Image (cartoon, rainbow, N blue to C red):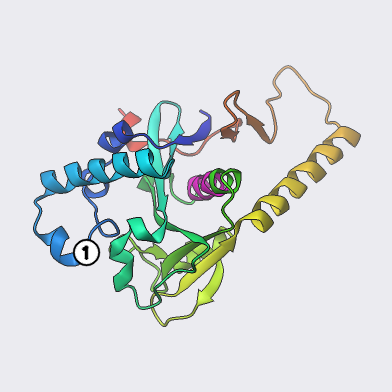
Amino acid sequence: MSRRTTSLRVDDLARLPPSERSCLFWQLGAVDRHRLDPDEQAREKQTWTSTVLREWGACGRVATVGDELVGYALYAPAAWLPGAQAMPSSPPSPDAVVLATVWVEPSCRRGGIGRLLVQGVARDLVERGHEALEAYGDTRGRTVGCVLPAEFLGGVGFGTQRPHPTTPRLRMELRTAISWKDEVEQALDRLWGVVRPVRTKAARPIGSVRAASGDPVIGTGPDTCVPARSVR
């Protein structure tokens, strides 16, 4: 099954697990979050997403394997994420958009889905003229209150912008990241143009291809990610 990312729609939130549908760690301050029950939290997140989409533009990506949603990423300017004000390494740089959330279904983790989502976010923002993406990481190797593991952020191209013992702020220079990735892809294209493997009837495509919409479709070979919901 192919893996791809597309822009987040409000309707996609209903396809997320309850914990992600109702997480307002970034969208509201602690006092306002605790006033809402889970159903109200889910409705508030839908309202927030709809408002940001209308007033600012695309604010997320979803990853799918076949027809199953297996991950999503959420991002926005700091003004839309008041929960970030409580972070000790706040505020983010004035030129940066904040990557708030990256969630991947447990059965599909460590398979490149998180990296795929971050690459999609980076491309979205470069096309809109943004210079940098920043995120808050947790150094304790876990996701705490929707704060991403710092190890994950470092592995997908972020570097430390403001150190902190447990929750540093990290930064990705978007044009540098996209330029480096494009240069690697071009080098691989040139290599395959010179040394072409002999194909047999059983051979399958190698590498990555792009869908007609421009969204990446990665991993056309065997896929180790089997969404839990699709297992009988």
Q: Residue furthest right?
A: 194
10 Å crowding of disc 1: few (<14), some (14-19), many (20+): some
Q: Is residue 44 above or below residue 203?
A: below
Does any portion of residue 134 appear in the rendered image? yes
Residue range in magenta is 112-122
* Residue at horizontal 68 percent and vertical 25 percent from the top: 204
Q: Position of residue 12 (x, y in %)?
A: 32, 34
Q: Quadrant of residue 191?
A: top right
Report whether 95 appears left or right of 226.
Answer: right
Q: Nearer the viewer, residue 45 or 184?
A: 45
- In the picture provided, is 36 more to the left or to the right than 106? left
Dot 1 amino acid type: Gly
Residue 14 horizontal/vertical position (percent): 25, 35
What kind of secondary structure does the magenta stretch mostly adopt?
A: helix
**Residue occupied by mark 1:** 29
From the viewer's side, name the closer residue of 147 and 227. Answer: 147
Instruction: Specify the quadrant that holds the C terminus.
Output: top left
Indicate the secondary structure of the residue bearing disc 1: loop
Image location of residue 154, percent across then percent down: 54, 65
Which residue corresponds to the image point at 30% horizontal and 59% vertical from the top-left? Answer: 26
Whether 174 is drawn above or below 16: the answer is below
Task: Pick out the residue farthest to the top.
Answer: 201
Q: Position of residue 224 (x, y in %)?
A: 50, 39
Query: How many callouts does the rendering have?
Result: 1
